Image (spheres, rainbow, N blue to C red):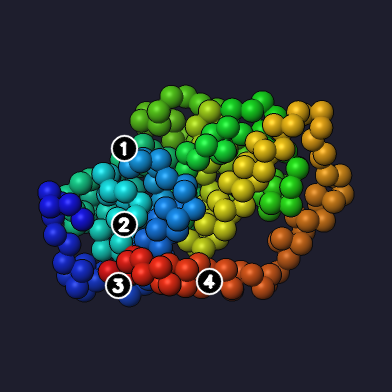
């Protein structure tokens, strides 16, 4: 970490938070590091957040760190009014992050984690009039619950929060921000990450498939799409318990620090 940042005393941060908060910090930091591995980053921009268990606070990245610099200890804790509760690096947070993430955490108390990205494929599909099409199995993971929010400019205006929450709706966990990027939400970091993985892959596949011409694209039948949706949403799907540990092992094998 660069010399102009505050030093982060890992034990001090860990000792002043609950074990439940620390576990969420570790998972959220892992999500940032995995995003760096999957190339979901956009310089120091975009943001992931997670609710602090048992408190009206959420965690978000320090504004100025690359995703591969983020660890459990250097996350910023803020409240639902945007007040900083804990900022180990002193870098503050991205205002657009508060606008986008704060409204979701406020409107949807069951949501624990929100991810927002600006990947090339995600932005490309966000700029396509057709939106996400049922072109791939990956698309069926999210397409049934996908919502859309029209572009209003950089998300710095507080009154956009009302429209963002409205457009996400009461049950959706995936949204395309038109001409902007992607958003997923989950009751855990794992769920939000899985949804983003499928949504971004579906966008990549769509860009590739449509490069051969719209008339050459083969849409799946409505029945096949419904079947795949039901299969993905079946109770106690085995991968729900298997994918996140596998992803953490990937980071561990590479010697990537996210737990400190």
Q: CA distance from mark 1 to mark 4?
A: 33 Å
Residue 106 in view of the camera? no
> At which x and y percent is residue 176?
57, 38
Q: Residues within 10 Å of mark 4 (few under 14, many from 20)?
A: few
Question: From the viewer's perspective, is 78 left or right of 162?
Answer: left
Q: Is residue 149 above or below residue 59?
A: above
Question: Residue 155, located in which quarter of the rendered image?
Answer: top left
The tag on residue 95 is 1
Q: CA distance from mark 2 to mark 1?
A: 18 Å
- Which of the two discs, 4 and 3, labels the residue nearer the N terminus? 3
Image depth: mark 4 or mark 3 in front: 4
Q: Quadrant of the N terminus?
A: bottom left
> At which x and y percent is residue 245?
51, 73
Q: Quadrant of the C terminus?
A: bottom left
Q: Which residue is more in the foreground, 255 or 129? A: 255
Residue occupied by mark 3:
18
Question: From the viewer's perspective, is 197 left or right of 156?
Answer: right
Q: Describe the element under mark 2 as helix, strand or loop.
A: loop
Name the residue at 80% across, 49% down. 225
Q: Residues within 10 Å of mark 1 (few under 14, many from 20)?
A: some
Q: Residues within 10 Å of mark 3 (few under 14, many from 20)?
A: few
The tag on residue 246 is 4
Q: Describe the element under mark 4 as helix, strand or loop.
A: helix
The tag on residue 70 is 2
């Amino acid at each position: 970490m660069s010399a102009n940042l505050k030093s982060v005393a890992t034990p001090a941060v860990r000792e002043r938070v609950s074990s439940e908060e620390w576990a969420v910090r570790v998972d959220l930091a892992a999500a940032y590091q995995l995003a760096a591995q999957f190339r979901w980053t956009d310089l120091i921009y975009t943001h992931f957040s997670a609710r602090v268990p048992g408190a009206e606070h959420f965690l978000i990245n320090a504004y100025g760190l690359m995703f591969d610099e983020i660890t459990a200890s250097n996350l910023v804790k803020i409240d639902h009014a945007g007040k900083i509760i804990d900022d180990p690096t002193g870098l503050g947070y991205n205002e657009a992050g508060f606008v986008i993430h704060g409204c979701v955490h406020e409107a949807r108390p069951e949501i624990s984690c929100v991810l927002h990205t600006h990947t090339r494929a995600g932005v490309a599909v966000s700029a396509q009039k057709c939106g996400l099409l049922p072109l791939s199995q990956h698309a069926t993971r999210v397409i049934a619950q996908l919502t859309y929010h029209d572009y209003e400019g950089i998300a710095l205006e507080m009154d956009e929060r009302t429209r963002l929450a409205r457009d996400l709706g009461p049950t959706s966990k995936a949204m395309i921000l038109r001409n902007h990027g992607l958003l997923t939400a989950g009751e855990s970091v794992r769920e939000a990450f899985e949804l983003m993985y499928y949504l971004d892959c579906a966008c990549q596949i769509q860009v590739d498939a449509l490069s051969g011409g719209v008339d050459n694209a083969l849409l799946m039948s409505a029945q096949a799409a419904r079947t795949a949706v039901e299969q993905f949403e079946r109770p106690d799907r085995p991968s729900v318990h298997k994918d996140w540990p596998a992803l953490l092992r990937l980071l561990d094998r590479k010697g990537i620090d996210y737990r400190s």
